[in-house]
Amino acid sequence: MSALRARHAPFADELDALVPELVAMEAYLGGPPRDLRTCHRDLWADNVRRARDGGLCVFDFDDAGLADPSQELAVVLVEYCTADPRRAGLVRGAYSEAGGPGRVEDPTDFAMAIAQLAHIVVKGCQRWLTAATDAERSDNEGWVREFIDRPLTRTVIEALLVD
């Protein structure tokens, strides 16, 4: 954080204000998976498109590998339900009804989302610090702001767990 402040990163104060919450969410990390299966492991909106037939097309399987499907379902809830947490119960229900194996029942089920978003923030900060142009700094600030503008917090996770 000191390097970001020294270089006058425009998001440094906002990110610094989130640090206590990020540290508190560490309690949700490290639990054992309930189930391991091959999962996409990068199921954010930029890797999903609507197909011509109205279905969904998932792509970019570079990170596919073993993971807990409950963790992956939690990523979907974060991506698509944070703006309106009431959707989370509907998504979980439709997923279960369709035979999906994951179940998001506990804050620890959000460990994948927490870790992935933290990684995105760290990479965005690192890249911002090493950027050579204003355009590169702006692009990497976008990575950081994606989290700052819609942070994943314990309150958000609790809201996504309500049916």
Image (tube, rainbow, N blue to C red):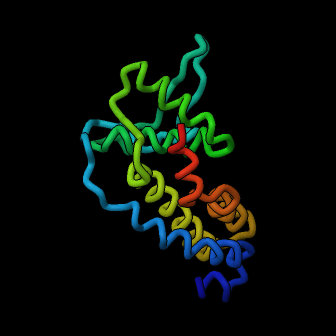
Along the viewing direction, whichever of 137 and 121 lies nearer the viewer = 121
Above/below status of 121 relative to 72: below
Instruction: Give the image quarter of residue 95.
Output: top left
Judged left or right of residue 131, residue 47 is left
Q: Residue at x 42, y 20 (%)?
A: 97
- Of residue 153 and residue 8, the one placed in the foreground of this image is 153
Percent x, y of residue 145: 68, 61
Which one is in front, 116 or 32? 32
Residue 42 vs residue 37: left or right?
A: right
Q: Is residue 62 visible?
A: no
Q: Is residue 29 left or right of residue 81?
A: left
| Left or right of 121 on screen, residue 96 | left
Residue at 71 percent across and 70 percent down: it is 133
Residue 34 seen in the current view? yes
Residue at x-position 46% and y-position 43%: 74
Residue 112 percent across, percent down from the top left? 41, 52
Residue 12 percent across, percent down from the top left: 68, 77
The residue depicted at 61 percent of the width and 40 percent of the height is: 81
Name above or below for residue 64 compared with residue 110. Answer: above
In percent of width and height, residue 18 lies at 61, 71
Quarter of the image with the N terminus in it: bottom right
- The residue furthest top is 53
Where on the picture, by quarter, is residue 155?
A: bottom right
Relative depth, front residue between 26 and 56: 26
Residue 13 higher or lower than 85, as above or below: below
